[in-house]
Image (cartoon, rainbow, N blue to C red):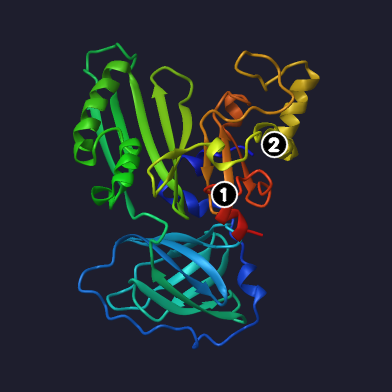
Amino acid sequence: MSLPLSGRYVGLLLLPLLVACQPDKPTQQPSASPTARQLPAEKPASAPFRGWRRYTGQVGSYPVVVELTFEDTATVGSYYYARYGELVPLRAQPPGPGQALRLREGTAATSSGTWEAVQPAGPVLSGTWRSPDGRRQLPFSLREEYAGAVRYEQVGFSREGQLPADSAVCGIPGRTVKFSLQGVQLLDAGSRPALQRIQQQLLPVPPAQLEAYVARQVADNVGDCTETEKSAWVSYNADHLLSVTFLEVVFAFGAPHPTHHFTTMTFNLQTGNRLGLADLLRPGYEQPLRQLLTKRLLADPSYGDFYRGEQAEGQQRWLDQAGRPQQLVPLPAGGVALTPAGLEFTWNEYTIAPYVMGPQSVELSYADLRRLVRPSGPLAAVVARHK
């Protein structure tokens, strides 16, 4: 499927919230009294509870992972069932001091339930999940927990530079040029060598030097007549695995449109090693994996119609590195991202489709990949947990 520019490139901090929710999971268990699993209410903290937080716990009898970012203006995040993985958005308006947290579940247009905690925002949350009509309810209990994961925060800087008013070098005298960077900073990297090795690959310079780095880059942009936005977000943070996706958007003055380039990195949090498909999948995975991706791409109405139309005209988009036509789609050069539901493969612009169709993305579930996953590799426990 293609990635819509308005959803993929704007509001990257909220990217996980754009995935379709699955409201039916809580209904698989009969209604239950919420009192049995509630935890004691926490006393309000003296300082505001802010930043990104990760919780584990249960809704009814279903294990869940919840990630929330608490800010002054709103609380946003998502959760997923450990055995299924589909992300469900969560959002709340900031409560008053000492007021209990109430989360709305679902998309902006459609609510699939509410989470009514008995505590204010804090390290322990418990209460009742209710369906939109109020007829179904389940107890939930959550605790802030980072076993097999890593604490992190988003860091970012943006700087503008002015072209000389009398300069026509870029064709637009006096134009403002911008360079912005949003990255991932691991909060425990200072005490863990494995995380230090990972951190060195997540940011172009140490975090303390980012502001100066951005200032230098905007000066380069003025000379190159370009504007650049670099973003990064975490797509998986569990089971001692961390997966981060990077997006670079570059607009060259005079060009008809910006370019967008995705890359991904996946790491073993215990060793700090970067992992590729060969570390996750059995030897000989390439051919069956390409078959799965080809089938999924051609099943997408938009891409399938485009590809068959080009084939009918004697054109071929799938080429190997030597430029030879291929019957199976090549694996994306930018890598693969882990998600709670599976592996996400993204082809950058122009690689398998024209610019107007945007980047193409396919997610294969862990169930789809079961026979390809290394039985004792980093994904073995993840696949065993999924249906």
Question: Which corner quadrant of the image does residue 224 belong to?
Answer: top left
Q: Residues within 10 Å of mark 1 (few under 14, many from 20)?
A: few
Q: What is the secondary structure assignment of the residue under circle 2?
A: helix
State which quarter of the image contains the C terminus: bottom right
Farthest-out residue, right: 312
- Work out whether residue 323 can be spotted: yes
Residue to which mark 2 is pinned: 297
Residue 350 at x, y percent in the picture: 58, 23
Q: Residue at the location (62% across, 45% down)?
A: 373
Residue to which mark 1 is pinned: 376
Viewer-closest of 142 and 77: 142
Residue 299 at x, y percent in the picture: 75, 39
Q: Which amino acid type is marked by label 1?
A: Ser
Could you tell me how far apart the alpha carbons at marks 2 and 1 are, in whole angstroms? 29 Å
Q: Residue at the location (52% across, 51% down)?
A: 18
Label of residue 205 in the image: none
Evaluate if marks 2 and 1 touch, with contact meaning CB atoms under 8 Å apart. Answer: no
Q: Residue at the location (49% across, 88% down)?
A: 35
| Left or right: 278 as drawn, with respect to 317 | left
Q: Which amino acid type is marked by label 2?
A: Leu
Q: What is the secondary structure assignment of the residue under circle 1?
A: loop
Q: Residues within 10 Å of mark 2 (few under 14, many from 20)?
A: many
Whether 121 is drawn above or below 146: the answer is: below
Residue 195 at x, y percent in the picture: 32, 46
Residue 223 at x, y percent in the picture: 27, 16
Question: Which corner quadrant of the image does residue 110 belong to?
Answer: bottom right
